Structures are given as structure tokens and as C-alpha cells.
Amino acid sequence: MKTLKEMISKYNRPGPRYTSYPPVPYWNNAPDETTWISHLQSNYDPEKGMDLYVHVPYCESLCYYCGCSRTITKNHAVEDSYLEMVLKEWDLYQQKLGFTPTINSLHFGGGTPTFLSPVNLDRLIKALLKNKLETFIGSIEIDPRTCQSAHLKVLADNDIKRVSLGIQDFDPLVQKAINREQSPAMVEALVEKIRKFNISSINFDLIYGLPKQTTESIAKTIEIVIKQRPDLIAFYSYAHLPEKIKNQRLIPNEDLPSPEQKRELYELGKKLLQENGYKDVGMDHFALPSSFLYKAKIENKLHRNFMGYVDKKSPILLGLGPTSISDSSLSFVQNIKEVKTYEQTIKANHLPIEKGHTHSSKDLLVQDMILELMCSNQTTIGHKDIPHWPEIQKELYEFEEDGIIELTENTLRLTEMGKAFVRNVAMCFDYYLREKTSSIKFSQTI
Ligand SMILES: C[S@@+](CC[C@H](N)C(=O)[O-])C[C@H]1O[C@@H](n2cnc3c(N)ncnc32)[C@H](O)[C@@H]1O
Ligand code: SF4
């Protein structure tokens, strides 16, 4: 039996997080605009509606660890042209599709959606939600430092009932090291207000592996989190890629925990959350038994997409705003990242698509297997057509020997210890990773 240290040194290597398959750097064969629209039209079902994702690319200040796509500015004059462009993009879609889709869900991500003034947020939501399903679900990412009561009122009035708060860590030294200072008292007061607005689900984003984190600081952070009792907790592994993400160079290497220390931080956080009634759901997520996510897990209805885990999805995810990703079930596309170019393309009446990928039947097979693994810690392996099956089988036996998985004839199941290596197991099915010898940069799996 290998020690945790030996396991980490064997398996800790760069790899995708599999919010999509294939991962974005491996996309090829992008659909052209006409094909993309035809994919949306052929998969649209008015009874199931569409899921909308809206990316708000602005933040007022820079968090040093941040790997999201965002522009830092304190100039709120940018809001007007941003709103105009996103709404024009939505109009272009409606014109090209020839109908106004029904909306199953709307998620605002970023950047920081609460960068928008409450008035602008209200305008945007109302324009997008003219035709929503009765079972509509609305959700938003909130920065506690920029969220006002007026934002919460807009959310409650417009049926946006699930909020996610960027917390990361409560320790003052860690907060200083990541340039994100927000006190537990300020967050607590905001949580209290959110609850008064009858918002049904509160998620906290936490990160482990940040500079200056120790087992003591994580224990203290978790203690504060538990007192505030969010319904959900995303406990993300810090993805540190300073060669690719310039702002992360502001974090000195010597302030970061080693891979073994980082794993210890996660295991401690997990233990404390579980002792306090949180259940683990999928990769890096914890949920109270009363939460929608835990119910979805129990009822086998958990899905994973670019935004994380969801309980209800339609066949189409349409992303609006710079960098947003869309999924027609037949293909993916991603919008232009650079805000100015995004705006110019829309002004010229074109969909602002930068790249895309059309799924092959092999892609869809592996996509299903990885999705199942990420949602339920097990996957079906009986298919005859899994690409590279002989090599995969050898690797699976090695995972089994190392205690990461248990194998039966048609199923692979992660062991409790093996959950830490879920990305490594997913990677063995990823034939793009196996076949391409390029220098694409991914974060470490542990
Ligand atoms: C768009 S932000 C959330 C909303 C808002 N911008 C905020 O920070 O409060 C999405 C989340 O991504 C996570 N995140 C950002 N950069 C990360 C990184 N390098 N590694 C792991 N998680 C990261 C953080 O937990 C963050 O809350
Ligand atoms: S973590 Fe959130 S607030 Fe901080 S820079 Fe990234 S997107 Fe902006």
C-alpha cells in the first residue's frame, strides 16, 4: 500500500478539470454560423427550453489568484455599452433562430455580475426573461464586497433564487496575500440580508491551496463558514498557472503549500464539513441534505457543465457576453474574449463566436463516461468502442492496484481515497490528451 505522499508524487500532474469534453484547448472542427444555428434549431424543444449563461466581465479589483476571464475597472460607464451589446447579441440569436426561446434557467457569472448597478441588472434580467418556463431556475455569482441590498431586491423580484458568494478564505493573512479583504462580519451581515429576501439557496466558494494557508487557518475558516450555514460549498483546488495567468505571478512560490500540504488542507476541510452535516457531492462540492444539489445527487439527476454542478438542464446552453461558452449537444462554441472585439463583431451583426467544436460519436461516448464519473464517482466501461481500450485497461488495473478504483465487469467505482484522483481517472479516457503531444497548460490534478 502506497503512502499518500507516494500517491501524490505518482499522480500529481497537469490535467483538465473536465467542465467539458473535449476540454477547450482540444476543440477542432468549429461549426460555421449557419451550422451552429441549425444545431440549436434542431435540438430546441420549447417544453424543455434553453439554459442561458450571461458573462459579466468586470471586477473592481484584482484577486491575485484569479483564473477567471475578467477586466479590472472602477469605471462603471462601461455598463451601458456592455448591456447594449449583450442585449443585441440576444436579439441576433432570436432573429437568426426565427423564434424567441423559452428559458429553463439563467445563470449570471463573471467577472462579477454585481458590478452592474441594480438598475442595469434589473433591465438585463427583464429583457432576457420575457419567455420563461414555470419551473425556471435563476442563479448568480455575487461578490460580497459589491453586493448591495438593492441588488438582492432585484434578484428576489425577478425570481433569481440561487446565489453563490465568492468567499475563498476568512483568514486575514491569506486575504492579504490574495489581495481580497472581506471580514466574516461583513459576509455574515450579507447572508442575513439574503435570507430575508427569501433567496432559497446560498453557496460559498472556498479555495484550498492558497498562499499562507495552514491547517489552522483552514480549520478557522471552516468554523466561520459552518456558523453561517450556506446550503452549498464549493471547495475548489487552487489552480496555479503563473506561466499562463500573469496576475498569479504576484503570489510568491514560497507562500504556497506543497502538494502534500495542499491535500492535507482539503482532507481537513472535508472532514470538518462532513462532521457538521455537509455531504460531498461530485468533485470539490459539499451540500446540506436539504439542498437541491444533494437531492439531485440522491435522485441521480446531477449534471455538470461549464458553470459547475446543476440539477436540471435543457438540451441547449446558450452563453451570452464575452468568453461565454455554449453547448448545443451537437457542438460547442465560445464567444470572443476581448471585450472591444466582441462589441465590434456584434455591431457588425455577426454572432461573436471565436472558436468551437463539433462532436464526433467518439466524443459523445467519452463525454458521457467522464460526466458520469464526475457526477456519481463511477462510470460504465462496457462499451466496445472506447478509443484506446487496451491501454486504458492496463491503466485501470494500475489504479485498482493503487486502491483508487474498484472494477467490476461493466463498472468502475472510485474508492473514498480514490476520489482525490478523479481527474487522473478521467484523463485515462481522454483520447485527445493521449493522442496530442502539444504543450497545452493545465493545472495540477492534486
Ligand atoms: C467569477 S468568481 C465568483 C464571483 C466574484 N467574481 C467573486 O470572486 O466573488 C468564480 C470563482 O472561481 C474561483 N476561482 C477563481 N480563480 C481560481 C483559481 N485560480 N483556482 C481555483 N478557483 C478559482 C473562486 O472561488 C471564485 O469565487
Ligand atoms: S475572483 Fe472574482 S472578484 Fe476576484 S478578480 Fe476573479 S472574478 Fe474578479
Image: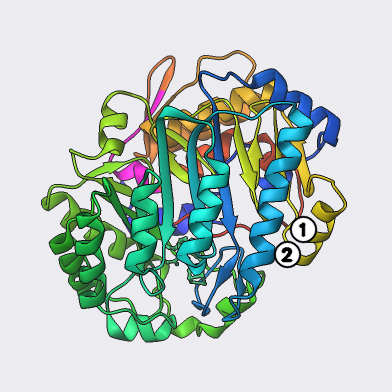
Q: Is residue 91 highlighted in magenta?
A: no
Q: Which residues are magenta?
A: 412-420
Foreground of the two, 398 or 99 = 99
Residue at image position (53%, 68%) is 240
Q: Is residue 53 above or below residue 267?
A: above
Q: Residue 351: x and y, percent?
A: 79, 45
In-front residue for pair 399/84: 84
Q: Which residue is mark 1?
A: 342
Q: Is residue 344 left or right of residue 160?
A: right
CB of mark 1 within 8 Å of CB of mark 2?
yes
Q: Secondary structure at mark 1?
A: helix
Image height check: is 281 above or below 359? below
The one nearer the camera, 337 or 233, is 337
Going by the numbered disc 2, the residue's amino acid type is: Val
Q: Residue at x 67, y 35 (%)?
A: 431
Picture quadrant where residue 177 is located: bottom left
Q: Based on the picture, tell me whether residue 413 belongs to the magenta stretch.
A: yes
* Left or right: 308 in relation to 150: right
Give the x, y percent position of residue 50: 56, 30
Q: Looking at the image, can residue 388 be seen?
A: no
Residue receiving disc 2: 339
Residue 168 visible? The answer is: yes
Report the side of 7 relative to 250 (left or right).
left
